[in-house]
Amino acid sequence: MIRMFALASAVAMVTGSAIAADETASVQKVRAERLATLTAPDGWLSLIGLEWLQPGANRIGSAADNDIVLKAGPVHLGTITLDDSGDATIELAKHSGALVDGREVERATLVDDTPGHKPTEVRFGSAHFFVIARDGRKALRVKDENAETRTHFLGLDYFPMDPSWRVVADWVPFDPPHELEIGSVLGTIDKEKVPGKAVFTREGHTFELYPIQEEPDSLFFVFADRTSGKETYGAARFLDTPLAKDGKLVLDFNEARNPPCAFTPYATCPLAPPENRLDVRITAGEKNYRGHP
């Protein structure tokens, strides 16, 4: 009997070690993919500008006499006209060398990043821009693969892996979905549909988190906790999870990551809603960026 108990204990230890190793490998894979996306030539680290378009003609280029002064590119790139209906067109200056969606043109309509649309890309040298639409306004999101934030990136820092922060939460679906107000660093408020909530306990307390669903096969959480503004980025951290299964949802906070605003002042990031500000220290996942702008 003693031998059988010892054997069972040994098997349990080996099984537990295998599960822990699998979980660690999964987190490391997520972190590696996150780093590759962040540091890609057109990733968030390449942002060099967020330039709001004004109604009418907007002269753009790197010279100081432009209405919009770019941090890279020809001195006079061209003129973007924003008409009364909100449509934007660009007329390129002669010899600007810029390409619109890879083509040499004199004039083109600029499609913005409204969901379901592929924004038009205007490329010049190592830099490019496209139009984004935010709260009824339009701006140029400007990127340069030689941006200092990318070429001088200091890397990502994490809390030590903590299996206890791989939380199996109860999933409470909403039918119909609830509406959640999520603010942004721009001062705007978006109303998002919430399909349900994750409920879990920690240190004898019950916590709830409300996700939005941007992709059909995953949930997206914007949350803050007692480490926010100290060890971690103040506005929020992000966490993606698979959909719930059999009424359960796995929240692995070791995979929590910073929003783009932790690395650049030119991003338009959501803030953690009051419902997702947790009164607990989540000492797992990504820490604040050492080179915070």
Image (cartoon, grey):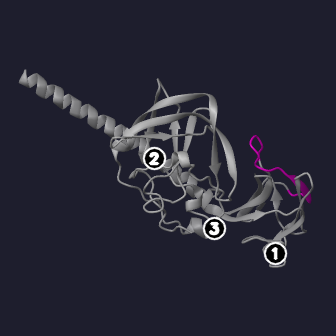
**Nearest the camera: 144 or 64?**
64
The residue drawn where x is 64% and y is 67% is 146
Q: What stretch is highlighted in magenta?
A: 104-118
Query: Mark 2 and mark 1 in contact (Cβ < 8 Å)?
Result: no
Q: What residue type is labelled 1?
A: Val
* N-term-proximal mark, 2 vs 3: 3
Q: Is residue 169 above or below residue 230?
A: above
Q: Is residue 178 above or below residue 38?
A: above
Lateral position of residue 36 relative to residue 106, left or right: left
Residue type, numbered disc 3: Ala
Disc 1 element: loop
- Across and down, in percent, residue 219 comes to 56, 37
Location of residue 124 (image quadrant): bottom right
In the picture, measured across the screen, residue 55 lies left or right of residue 131, that is right
What residue occupies the far top of the structure in this picture? Answer: 1
3D distance between C-alphas at marks 1 and 3: 18 Å
Q: Residue 98 versus residue 22: which sits nearer the camera?
A: 22
Instruction: Name the residue that disc number 2 marks.
Output: 255
Whole-angstrom CA distance, mark 2 to mark 3, is 27 Å
Element type where label 3 sits in the image: loop
Residue 6 lies left or right of residue 112; in this view the side is left
- Residue 142: x and y in percent read 72, 62
* Location of mark 3 (residue): 147
124 or 19: which is nearer to us? 19
**Furthest-left residue in this view:** 2
Q: Classify mark 2: helix, strand or loop.
A: helix
**Mark closest to the chain's N terminus, 1 or 2:** 1
Q: Mark 1 points at which residue?
A: 75
The quadrant of the rendering that contains the N terminus is top left
